[in-house]
Amino acid sequence: MNPITTLYPVNELFETIQGEGMYTGTPAIFLRLQGCPVGCPWCDTQHTWETSEDAKVSAQQMLAKTSATAQWAELTAAQLLELFQQQNFNAKHVVITGGEPAMFDLRELGQTLEQAGYRLQIETSGTFELKLTENTWVTVSPKLDMPGGYLVRPDCMKRANEIKYPVAMQKHIDALDNLLRRCPPRADALIALQPISQRPRATELAIKVCIERNWRLSVQLHKYLNIE
Ligand code: SF4
């Protein structure tokens, strides 16, 4: 019996430079999936929250978007691979983001792309069970106490290759410390602090704590460069 082919709701597909975390500076194909129930009040991709049938468009219409909208296209892994080739993307690193991409079973996508020579990275809030290939690089950006009521899962924290946490004040460091106690990551997981909105005091705090703890600083390079 053939396995059921997974359909992925794609909000955006573009090539750029990864600006955050371990792979900062790496040319990457960003695949933004539609849908997220977590509800972070400061979310900068609120247009990805709802998946409305009325907003469903063709792959070409999705690719032609010039602004952030809730329009999405439904694509299989094989169709996505074909689009990568049609778009002449050069990058071999694929960042699956959202929305909350862990709402979907990403194993078929991972297998298809890995067989074609791509490496995958997922950026997730850590609130959904991960269905990924073994080689997928997992970046958990834990979202705590958000209005959607989803809890950060210990299994996600254990699977994380990297934990990337936005900080502005000491209370954010304290919240991260509590989470790391409650849901310990693996010993080799990278922990990266990301100053919120490039604020100087947030950056100063993040630098200080990173040096004290031997953690990484993630500065959102794309925002300094003013690229997508
Ligand atoms: S988890 Fe991500 S996409 Fe979802 S609301 Fe929070 S910041 Fe936005």
Image (cartoon, rainbow, N blue to C red):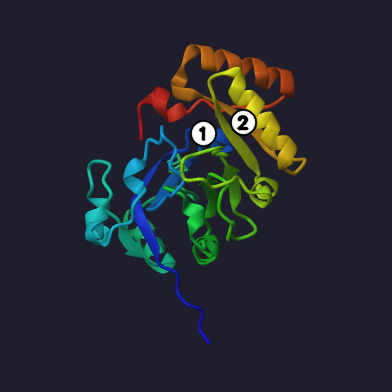
State whether residue 161 is above or below residue 169: below
Going from N to C along the chain, the mark reached first, 2 or 1, is 1
Q: Which residue is at 73% across, 23% downward? A: 213
Hey, what amino acid is under mark 2? Ala
Q: Residue 76, located in which quarter of the rendered image?
A: bottom left
Q: Position of residue 8 (x, y in %)?
A: 40, 62
Q: Position of residue 212 (x, y in %)?
A: 72, 18
Q: Position of residue 224 (x, y in %)?
A: 41, 22
Tell whether label 1 touches label 2 (CB within 8 Å): yes
Q: Which residue has dot 2 on it?
A: 192
The quarter of the rendered structure image containing the C terminus is top left
Q: Which residue is at 37% across, 53% downward? A: 34
> How far is disc 2 from disc 1 in space, using C-alphas?
9 Å
Mark 2: which secondary structure? strand
Relative placement, left or right, of 226 versus 187 is: left
Confirm if mark 2 falls within 8 A of ligand 1.
no
Q: Which residue is at 56% across, 53% downward? A: 128
Q: Position of residue 117 (x, y in %)?
A: 53, 58
**Label at residue 105:** none
Relative placement, left or right, of 13 versus 28 is: left
Q: Quarter for ligand 1?
A: top left
Mark 1: which secondary structure? loop
For marks 2 and 1, give the one nearer the viewer.
2
Q: Which residue is at 52% across, 54% downward? A: 102
Q: Residue 57, located in which quarter of the rendered image?
A: bottom left
Relative placement, left or right, of 50 versus 112 is: left
Q: Which residue has dot 1 on it?
A: 20
- Can residue 60 be seen at all in this image of the molecule? yes
Hey, what amino acid is under mark 1? Glu
- Can residue 90 be seen at all in this image of the molecule? no
- Residue 26 versus residue 147: which sits nearer the camera? 147
Q: Which residue appears farthest toward the right when viewing the image? A: 187
